[in-house]
Image (spheres, rainbow, N blue to C red):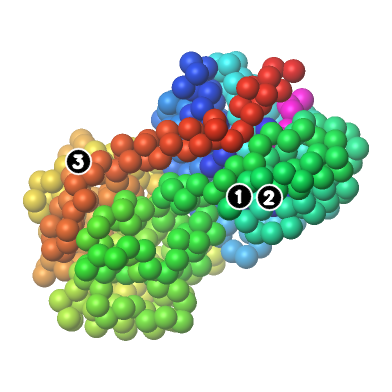
Amino acid sequence: MVQGTGSNVGKSLLVAGLCRVFARRGLKVRPFKPQNMSNNAAVTADDGEIGRAQALQARAAGVPPSVHMNPVLLKPQSEIGSQVVVQGRVVGTARAREYQSWKPRLLEAVLESFGKLAGEADLVLIEGAGSASEVNLRAGDIANMGFARAANVPVVLVGDIDRGGVIASLVGTKAVLDEADAAMIEGFIVNRFRGDPTLFDQGMRIIAERTGWAAMGLVPHFADAARLPAEDGLGLRRAGSRHGKGSVVIAVPVTPWISNFDDFDPLREEPGIEVALVEPGEPLPADAALVLLPGSKTTIDDLLFFRAQGWDIDLKAHVRRGGQVLGLCGGYQMLGRRIDDPFGIEGEAGRSVEGLGLLDVTTTLTARKRLEAVTGMTVSDEAPLSGYEMHIGETSGPDASARPFARLEADRLDGAVSADGRVAGTYVHGLFADDRQRKRWLDRLGAESGGFAYEALVDDILDRFADHLEAHLDCDRLLAISAR
């Protein structure tokens, strides 16, 4: 089990890289994260949803993603509450304090899923959540030491030297842990080192002496890790407000409950595109050729936030100038005339909110959630597409009937396009990861294309990252620990 001294120390990518390392050695490897908190989710082969990081780890291991790889997924809906997904299905919502009382019964599902994976694998690589040192939350824990003790799995602790204070964070974790919890930790990894690694030789010795844990390696910074799909909004903002130097600007407004934002990762790789992340308080850039409205975990609240920033005014001016707009999932719902919530899916029952009015459609939020991989083609030019749907709500109206965005398998229609063709919306995520669709949009925007295969690019980065870990970690020792 790979635990961390804090959030965002690199646990997710280290597990992904190690999945690739050991899968290349011929082992049957499975990733596992008992509890995750993320609005960046993926559809699984068994028609559920898990955190995006576990889907990437499954890919690194060369296996289809399964709901058992992330049995508890928390999807934040407010500052203090989250939707709770258990083994791929929504079971309810809980406030942070209330959720603590759920943990004992959730541990059963977590151990059941772990047992299923362990039964089919030679090696299960487990990712912890947040910080191992959050001893104030230790009672009932299912994400870190609580799980490690319940499943009797050895732990390796990761610290991030790039943020500073790594000696204190690793030694301090040992100091605050219960003695029995600390005994589960076999070794430590220092991640994201920059510069001459010999300068930290003494630091590694100090940590080992103060903790009694074995040094498993000092991992230099691997820049291309930032090009892999990010787990959460921290990864989104680390990428910077502008990415790329292309002549065509695509603007993406960043709302509080943005979800599945890896939708626009492939665009960042294109030489002709500059992706501009528009933070609160900033106007939508006047030089944008396309404004991309991403998905949302809480569409109504994000719509109200969008309007409060004045982005609705900017967006209509953008369309008047001849610019184009694409809404994905929640972004599609926002573009319509109205969003109705008769059952209180996102708050008070019976709430109805005026949309941005750029598409003549109306959305009704319903409890049923559609989770499935899809294929089809865009109606306007019959360009093939593939991706996935992950949404609640049904959207209909004149624009959807007269000008659907796509025709999916089983002759099912999706999305809508405005009469002038400048505004479109779709429920299909992963649109730009399909090279055929991405090229269609680049041609439409008059942007230079890199002509690369995005999925092959991701696999190449995973392979190079695995090489990087093989060179800097004691992978043989890690494997030996797992067999104790």
Residues packed near mark 1 inside 10 Å, few (<14), some (14 to 19) or many (20 plus)? few
Describe the element under mark 2 as helix, strand or loop.
helix
Describe the element under mark 1 as helix, strand or loop.
loop
| 210 with respect to 481 (left or right) | right
| 244 with respect to 451 (left or right) | right
Label 2, label 1: how far apart the Cα atoms are: 6 Å
Does the rendering let one see residue 309?
Answer: yes
At x 91%, y 37%, the residue is 179
The stretch of residues the image draws in magenta is: 151-157
Residue 197: x, y in percent?
Answer: 63, 46
Label 1, label 3: how far apart the Cα atoms are: 51 Å
At x 48%, y 29%, the residue is 20
**Front one among 316 and 403:** 316
- The quadrant of the image that shows the C terminus is top right
Q: Are marks 2 and 1 in contact (CB under 8 Å)?
A: yes
Residues packed near mark 2 inside 10 Å, few (<14), some (14 to 19) or many (20 plus)? few
Label 3, label 2: how far apart the Cα atoms are: 55 Å
- Please name the residue that numbered disc 2 is placed on: 199
